Image: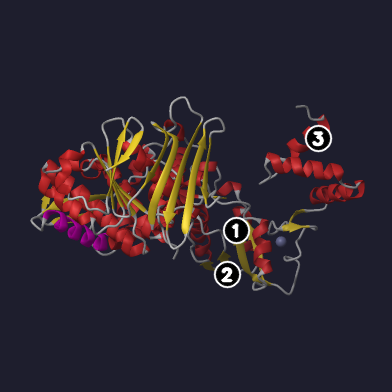
Amino acid sequence: MILTSVKLKNFRCHKDISLSFSENLNYIVGGNGQGKTAILESIYYLCTTKSHNTNSDIEVLKFGENVFEIFGSFKNLVNDEVRVIYSSEENKKRYLQNGKHKHRLSEVIGNYPIVLLTPVDHSITFGYPGDRRKFFDSIYCQASAAYLGLLVDYNRTIRQRTSLLYSIRENRNKNFSELDAWTQKLLETGAELINYRKNFFSEFELFVKQAHSEILNGNENPGLTYFYLSGYDGKDIKDRFAELLEAKREDELRRCACLVGPHKDDFIFDINGINLKTFGSQGQHKTFQVALRFAEFFYLKEKTGKAPIFLLDDVFGELDTARSVRISENLRRVGQTFITLTDFTDISYLHKRSTDTVIKLMDGIVTYA
Amino acid sequence: MQIAEPLQIAIEELSKLPSIGRKTAQRLAIHLLKSDIDAVEKLLSAIQNLKTKLRFCNRCFNISTEDLCDICSNHKRDHSLICVVEEASDVIAVEKSNEYHGSYHVLAGVLSPLSGVGPESLHIKELLKRFETEEIQEIILALNPDTEGEATSLYLAKLIKPLGVKVSRIARGLPIGGDLEFADEATIGRAVLGRITL
Ligand SMILES: [Zn+2]
């Protein structure tokens, strides 16, 4: 599946532009404020109905306008025309595929899979456990509808049980057998979730090792450790889970919070057995982030049978030349890719080919190099 | 724009009904306005009869015309078997399958602390009472396989098992996030990208 063209109206700084793309690498070049990232954002809209940057559509609307419009053509076995139209007056967004309105996310998601590498990926290796859970959940949910269902169920259970803990503390409710039932529900769904994650990690780690060695030529050996139930590594997850729930019971009642379960999981990265978060250099972090996104790409391609569109936002600025060259070589194996760059002269080493497209943005004018 | 008051009131009332939006309510009101008086009166009495001729069964809380519903008073049914469901509409669904010949118990909801629904708001006490007067051998928990349905099943199983009765549960299903709003709320956002149907 290839995105052949995009038209934007009143989208971020773009009043009215049309772009056509290569099915290989597309370099989007321009200075600050020329709207490079906005192009990637519009592609993200076409594939997912929303922005990767913001939850509010009105933020994306060009200042002083009422309606933005994104129009994209996908070339597949058949061609798809996708339109996203947002009106601030109605505060309404419409998503149309070949002229037909799509009302549900599930009708859209999965049609045009997408992987995005951005500077925000910083938080995956530097940030909190929650950032890492979000990253891995988003990958696994794309590959497994069963996992997505389980995750929604588990999160709902946490909300229900937390609400019950509050009402017990406020004395509105002294029914502990009701709490026991919700605890049991948490344990059953949570244990299943942990088992899914264990399986996912043993598989995904291989994709990360592969991607990492291709970027770095095999000098470093990356590792992933799944950290669950306070560092448990034994066989019977349910027994351990029940033990921890029992130990934290008083704490949970006092603090009105669910303190045990996969919503507290973490994922630890290491290089040659040395903890990345604590001891890794900037370059090692960046390489790891890139490897994780490449791993996501190849994992999803294998699991869903569709090659995602790959977006790289402002990636090369932070990497040394050797790594940048290896990454761009690896992109040859990926398929259609969109890369934003601040200054094209800096990346002559990326070996542009004749099948690639270079799009220059300057004061709203598009030129192809 | 001015709308005649009786029409306005009709639209207001109709749009209070579940899954009826304003536009549909308008269409329905206009349709009724154009209909014969006969047809309107038939509809009116059908609605009125729901309240005057129907009640909930004293034993199982199914919809009934008498104190006991047709299923509870039917001697050909197996009354040692109780199928526990969430709403009376679930009784209709199971009955349509023509596979089940036991009796029912309607809980009138499921546990949901977020909406303030605890065991005391459901017909659970009444279910336990039935063990005193009926010869019950098996309870089938047929609640919806969603988060609240499963928690309620676990709650009931814990209550009923000590009574020495067989308790069974229908297989778990998978709630899948559907529309745009839902996915945002669940903060799974792009989580649903590219998922495959199993
Ligand atoms: Zn009855």
Query: Dividing the image into 4 quarters, which one contains the N terminus of chain A?
Result: bottom left
Q: Which amino acid does label 3 sit on?
A: Leu
Q: Is residue B57 above or below residue B198?
A: above
Asked whether A188 or A217 is in front, the reply is: A217
Mark 1 highlights which residue?
B128
Query: Is A249 on the left-hand or right-hand side of B179?
Result: left
Q: Distance between the residues labelled 3 and 1?
A: 48 Å
Question: What's the chain of the residue with tag 2?
Answer: B
Disc assigned to residue B7 = 3
| Near-viewer residue (A154 or A62) | A62
Magenta stretch: includes residue A211: yes
Question: Residue A342: x, y in percent?
Answer: 23, 36
- Please give the count of numbered marks on the rendered protein: 3
Which circle's residue, 1 or 2, is located before the other in the chain? 1
Q: Position of residue A60 (x, y in %)?
A: 42, 33
- What residue is rendered at 76% in x and 65% in y? B70
Whichever of callouts 3 and 2 sits on the residue coming sooner in the sequence is: 3
CA separation in Å, label 1 and label 2: 13 Å
